[in-house]
Image (tube, grey):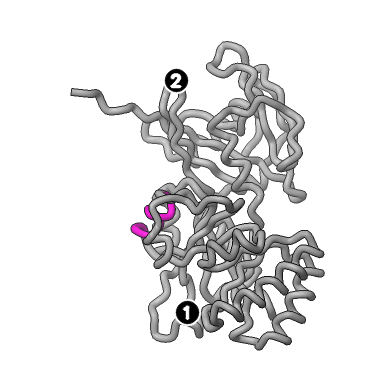
Amino acid sequence: MSNPVRIVDVAVGILVKPDGQFLLGSRPAGKPFAGFWEFPGGKLEAGETALAALARELFEEMGITVTAAHPWLTQTFTYPHATVRLHFFCVTAWQGDIQSREGQQFAWQANRALTVSPILPANGPIMRGLQLPATLALSAVALLGPETWLARLEQALANGLRWLILREPQLDGTAYAALAREVLQRVRAHHAQVFLHDQIDLARELGADGVHLSARTAATLNARPRGLDWVGASVHNATELAQAQRIGVDYAIAGHVKETTSHPGAAPLGWTSFAALTGQGWPFPLYAIGGLSPADVAQAQTHGAHGVALLSGAWQ
């Protein structure tokens, strides 16, 4: 009879500056993977919450007091010496100067422009999640009409919009493909990214940046669609989140959190139920959706979200 795998729980902090730079630290001599770079943190002690462990470890290792942190995602990784469950937190505020209390080095880094290596294997996939913005926009042709929406798209791109999901289920295949071509042309001029909704083959054909799957489509898949840089999915419950994990999505959108005109009569999740979903420890970032605006980003993050996905709120 095989022995069950012992999992070591570890709290990990991603210290983030307002400009998006994040902190990596080197593993000191005497530890496994000494010299590798990682996000700072440490093991949970008996009876300790992940957040409490994070605060303790960052004070012990770096001399700082965490004043603002929110849960982000959870990764389980098997090393030759141990299987670890990493509870990642985004740390956005702290007090004190960062010190090297264990002989480690520290370096502020920008995503996709790392100046240190090698990176600890469990931390490598986290870099991908850090590329995601705090807001995703869903298109609103059905709500605003094509001319008005395209005009607002141009304005939003000029104001910094960088990630767009082209979701227009009212359009037939030909009309959707034509719109996708026009949107891709406009968006590429601003170096932004476009994800087609459920149109996997069309996304490959047009060279879109990725595809966003409805929960219904995600349920039919046995693996991640190939040939696409990014894959996301809409979810409403833990079962759909588990399927999203199974096929290897990069992010998921969960909701609806508040009452919306697009779901008349449907009871919203509310922030408490949303937090219960995120608190189950998924290995990819989650966005909240449903009746939200950019002003809801901070509240969403306190409930475990990476940020918010916006429909009408993106085009006002």
Q: CA distance from mark 1 to mark 2?
A: 48 Å
Give the residue at mark 2.
Answer: 80
Mark drawn on residue 201: none
Residue stretch rendered in magenta on the structure: 238-245
Q: Is residue 244 magenta?
A: yes
Give the residue at mark 1.
Answer: 259
**In the foreground, 72 or 57:** 72
Residue 299 percent across, percent down from the top left:
57, 62
Point 59% across, 79% down: residue: 174
Left or right placement of residue 315 versus residue 275 in this view: right
- Amino acid residing under circle 2: Pro
- The chief SS type of the magenta part is helix
**In the foreground, 305 or 136:** 136
Residue 134 percent across, percent down from the top left:
64, 59
**In the foreground, 209 or 261:** 209
Taking 175 as reference, is 130 above or below it? above
